[in-house]
Amino acid sequence: LLGSLADDLAHGITALRWRIAHQNAEQALEESRERYHTLFNAMTEGFALHEIVSNEAGEPYDYRFMDINRAFERLTGLKREKVVGRTLREVMPHDTERWIETYGRTSLTGESIRFQSGGHTSRHYEVYAYRPAPGQLAVILRDITQRKREEEELRRHRDHLEELVRERTAELM
């Protein structure tokens, strides 16, 4: 009887230890999630996580917004509550093929890409896209509009100076 009682007591203590360890692990996980979301939403670069949608042939046909941060909302004007869970074709039915082709290539090959986008709008962006897991695509978006304006201003000044040099050279000759 005492042996059975000791076994029951040992089992109970082990179960309590496992329960406490499980609660501690859940608390640590929740704290980690909170830190992640704080960092995710405090980023100055826009971030979007997408799920690639493929057709019957396995080719990328569309992508679904899984998550976006506040900076992505600010930079693109897309609101999280209106895009998460929806596909690009649902959110922006125009000009989808270019984005699906570009991002689809990255999702298939796993090769990261970096490019600049803009010019057709008043904003310019540097875009970095990579595949964090099969079937997913992560996009980091940085606003480079001010840098582009400064580069254009420098180009205009350089062109003007070159024209002045040509004129002065012609006068001297």
Image (cartoon, helix red, strand yellow):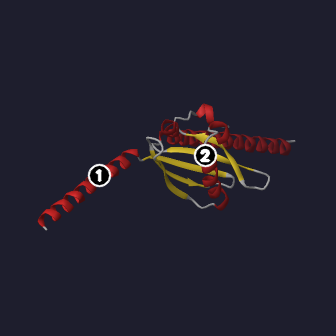
Where is residue 53 drawn, in percent x and y? 71, 48
Q: Residues within 10 Å of mark 2 (few under 14, many from 20)?
A: many
173 up-or-down from 88: above or below: below
| Residue occupied by mark 2 | 49
Q: In this view of the protein, which residue sits in the foreground, 83 or 159? A: 159
In this rendering, position of residue 4 left or right of residue 136: right
Q: Quadrant of residue 107?
A: bottom right
Quadrant assignment for the N terminus: top right
Q: In this view of the protein, which residue sits in the foreground, 127 or 29? A: 127
Q: Residues within 10 Å of mark 1 (few under 14, many from 20)?
A: few
Identify the residue at horizontal 80%, vertical 52% (top origin). Answer: 56
Instruction: Evaluate whether residue 48 shows in this view.
Output: yes
Amino acid at circle 1: Arg
In this rendering, position of residue 75 left or right of residue 152: right
Q: In this view of the protein, which residue sits in the foreground, 146 or 153? A: 153
Report the label total: 2
In this rendering, position of residue 60 left or right of residue 158: right
Question: Residue reaching furthest left?
Answer: 172
75 up-or-down from 166: above or below: above
Q: In which quarter of the image is residue 78?
A: top right
| Residue occupied by mark 1 | 156
The span from disc 1 to disc 2 (Cα, nearest Å) is 38 Å
Instruction: Evaluate whether residue 87 shows in this view.
Output: no
Where is residue 121 drawn, in percent x and y? 47, 41
Question: Residue reaching furthest right?
Answer: 1
